[in-house]
Amino acid sequence: MATEIQSGKVHVQTTINGESVDFLAEPRESLLEVLRDNLGLTGAKEGCNNGNCGACNVVMDGVLVNSCCVLSVEAAGASIETIEGVASPEGLHPLQQSFLENAALQCGVCTPGFIVAAKALLEENPNPTEYEVRWWLAGNLCRCTGYDKIVRAVLDAAERMRAEA
Amino acid sequence: MRAIQYAAPSTVEDAVAILAEHGSDARMLAGGTDLIVQVREDARDTGVFVDAKKIPELMDLSVNADGSTTLGAAVPCHQLYNNAQFAASYPAVVDAARIIGSTGIQGRASVGGNLCNSGPAGDTIPPLIVHSAVCNIAGPDGERTVAVEDFCTAPGRNVLADGELLVSLTLPKPPAGSGSHYLRFIPRNEMDIAVVGAGASLVLDGESITAARISLGAVAPTPLFVQAAGDALIGLTANEDSFAVAADIARDAASPIDDMRGTIAHRKQLSYVLTQRALRGARARAQGGSPTNGH
């Protein structure tokens, strides 16, 4: 059977933060553009739009990715987790609370990416060293904090999460 | 980005049919971390994106009956360092997979994509060369194989003809007593493009070298297989004097350019130093240890 070649507006069915979502998008649109412009999920930010800065980080099928480097149509059948799904109705995620208490943000543009990336790290490695935190987050750029407070916030959140586990 | 068409075939045959129909306007999409950015920034004019990730052969990572490993062309980097068996067998490839871009890049970017992008500084290419990896290519006229060291032909160019795609890489089973290492020089700690990269593999019988392969990146229009440097080590003892002999040959083989990342003189010297370090790391692994420098 010949494969369909999609162009124009394509109907995409996906799952975002556990909810089934349908959208129409052109193949040239990135997942980031669809999240922000079609679906109103503006937590993920467009920083560099070329995979360097991590401000658009989301988790796709369990893997941390830069949503600017994913085509919208690639989301078909996938499960996407964005910053909007990190907090629960009961309150902030420990990482979010820790970022606040450790003053790990100033302008805040990089923060959603850092939190999504750090959450992915702690799910894989609940007790990272400072080196492992810095290495994992090397693809998230922050021009305000100098990174130190961010790294401390992640280590602090990891400790809280281990204590609660 | 310009308007594009997108197809997600589920078989190699379908992918070949689409590639053959659209010629040079079509490209395979693996992780997209190069291709999507290149098309968005008008560095490459591609109208048809053919998604590799629904084709089982391109996502395969398995050990064959003869002990070799098949690495599907679109398998993302993170699967390699999370696969203990692959990491133990092909450590130089994993060294590269860990340092390409960031965690978010490694979640999508593939070794096959890095090879097909055919950049002179592609970090996975010297490791594939030192592991004697072979490209399995499919096209309208059937299948063919090409050694990785013969795959790239110029910056951004390779042997793939219109209608052809890289299906997978075959990595031979590493012999007993072997080890490999890849490292690069960058002026930062991470998230950068190699000024020079060097890979080495060694097979040891006690202290004696029975086989060796050395490859350099970013010192020529294509990743360089420095066969003479490896051959010069055969029969020698795996020590600093021997490694200096190979490093001299590697430095002579390098023909780098001056650019914003480094000068010719710097890259020549790096070719020497990194070859030494790659060999030390390969020796450490062949002896059951781990490299003490680089990542």
Image (spheres, rainbow, N blue to C red):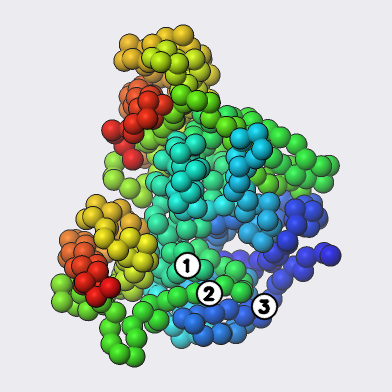
Out of A17 and B191, give the one closest to the viewer. A17
Quadrant (top left/top right/bottom left/bottom right) for the N terminus of chain B: bottom right
Q: Is residue B224 left or right of residue B288?
A: right
- Pointers 1 and 3 within a single chain: yes
Measure how far apart labels 1 and 3 are at the Cα level: 24 Å
The reply to whether callout 1 and callout 2 are in contact (CB within 8 Å) is yes
Out of B122 and B90, give the one closest to the viewer. B90
Measure how far apart labels 2 and 3 are at the Cα level: 18 Å
- Pointers 2 and 3 within a single chain: yes
| Vertical order, B134 against A153 (above or below) | above
Q: Residues within 10 Å of mark 1 (few under 14, many from 20)?
A: few
Q: Earlier in the sequence, mark 1 or mark 3?
A: 3
Q: Which numbered mark, 2 or 3, is in the foreground of this view?
A: 2
Q: Which residue is mark 3?
A: A10
Q: Is residue A41 left or right of residue B29?
A: left
- Pointers 1 and 2 within a single chain: yes
Q: Is residue B104 left or right of residue B32?
A: left
Q: Position of residue B254 (x, y in %)?
A: 45, 23
